[in-house]
Image (cartoon, rainbow, N blue to C red):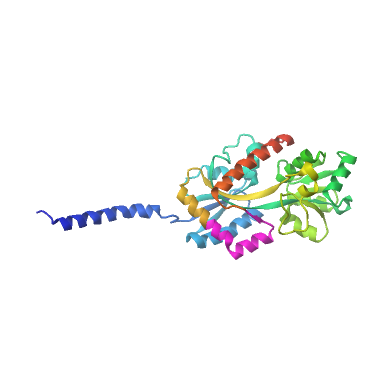
Amino acid sequence: MTLPKRNLLGMIAGAAMLAALPVQAQDKFPDRPIMFVVPFPPGGPTDAMARILATELTRELGQAVVVENRAGAGGNIGADFVARANPDGYTIMFGTSGPLAINHSLYKGLKYDPRTSFEPVIYVGYLPNILVVRPGLGVNSVQELIAKEKAKPGTLNYASSGNGASSHLAGVLFNGMAGTQLVHVPYKGTGPALNDLLAGQVDMTFTDILTAMPYIKSDKVKALGVATAKRSSAMPDIPTIAEQGGKELKGYDVSVFFGVVAPKGTPADRVKLLNQAFTRALATDKVRQTFAAQGLEASPDHSPAYLGRFIKAEVDKWAKVVQQSGVQLD
């Protein structure tokens, strides 16, 4: 029996709609929880920020965004895990300067490349480092510190949280630009380094502003300069190292940046959706106020392309400093 043409066309159209349904269902993203990898232990500042973002992202995306800590090797274990993950948008990482820039030249045999192993999603912001000294050192500015050091080269020292840490490399960069010979004293973590500074056992340290803030406000340490291109919004009265150091220290900039990346090959439409969700989350009052109170400076540009360019520039910058330091880690 021959069907009327109108019925036949209707059946064809109906079949086409049914065939399209599974494809549409597959294209819905996200339709299950997203793993938000933090390559550091629970309880630290990176973990705390990730959990605040995860809560807001869960609301934005309508799916759970679950923080998973994969710590070890300065962030490399978590970064390598994400680099090898299925590039479907369901595994992303909240990375920092270590795994996304410094570690590329610091660690031998790194299994991933921060410039090519990830799809950049968004640059969240940066946490300024700050140079603080023991109150009894007798200096009140970066210029006075440089003059004191050059009068007796090699007699002043600075503590760091360990070989290759940003607090170590900040001093290497300072020495290279200022022509000083500050002696590096490595510790096993920020806590022990700061404790010895408070006890007057070491002269100074470069640490993040969040850690230093309560000690500066209680006059237990003296802040000489913020180690970034512009002054900190959290402590605007403290000048930058660059603005005090003359032409030698022009451009001195050491901070810990925070960015979100996904495995290389993650579809562009999913990267775009994640970027938009993060941008909205960062604009909420809760996130803005919490991050500002912690000293975090917001990124000037939230586009994926900006983070990609920034990571490449940071890899190149820190490769030179690591080479100057002579440090190589396994």
* Residue 123, x across and y down, in percent: 59, 51
Q: Is residue 70 visible?
A: yes
Would you say 3 lies left or right of 156 here?
A: left
Q: Is residue 282 magenta?
A: yes
Q: Residue at x 50, y 44 (%)?
A: 85
* Residue 138, x across and y down, in percent: 89, 51
* Residue 203, x across and y down, in percent: 84, 47
Q: Is residue 144 magenta?
A: no
Q: Which residue occupies the extreme left position in the image?
A: 1
Query: Where the N terminus falls, by quadrant?
Result: bottom left
Magenta residues span 277-299
Q: Which residue occupies the extreme front position in the image?
A: 247
Quadrant in the picture for residue 289: bottom right
Q: Residue at x 58, y 61 (%)?
A: 283
Of the pair 165 and 228, the residue shown nearer to us:
228
Would you say 101 lies left or right of 7 here?
A: right
Q: Residue at x 32, y 55 (%)?
A: 21
Question: Is residue 251 shown above or below 302?
Answer: above
Of the pair 189 and 136, the residue shown nearer to us:
136
Magenta segment's dominant SS is: helix
Q: Residue at x 69, y 49 (%)?
A: 255
* Residue 232, x across and y down, in percent: 72, 56
Of the pair 199 and 298, the residue shown nearer to us:
298
Query: Where the C terminus falls, by quadrant?
Result: top right
Would you say 73 lies left or right of 117 here?
A: right
Q: Is residue 44 visible?
A: no
Count of numbered badges drawn on the protein: 0
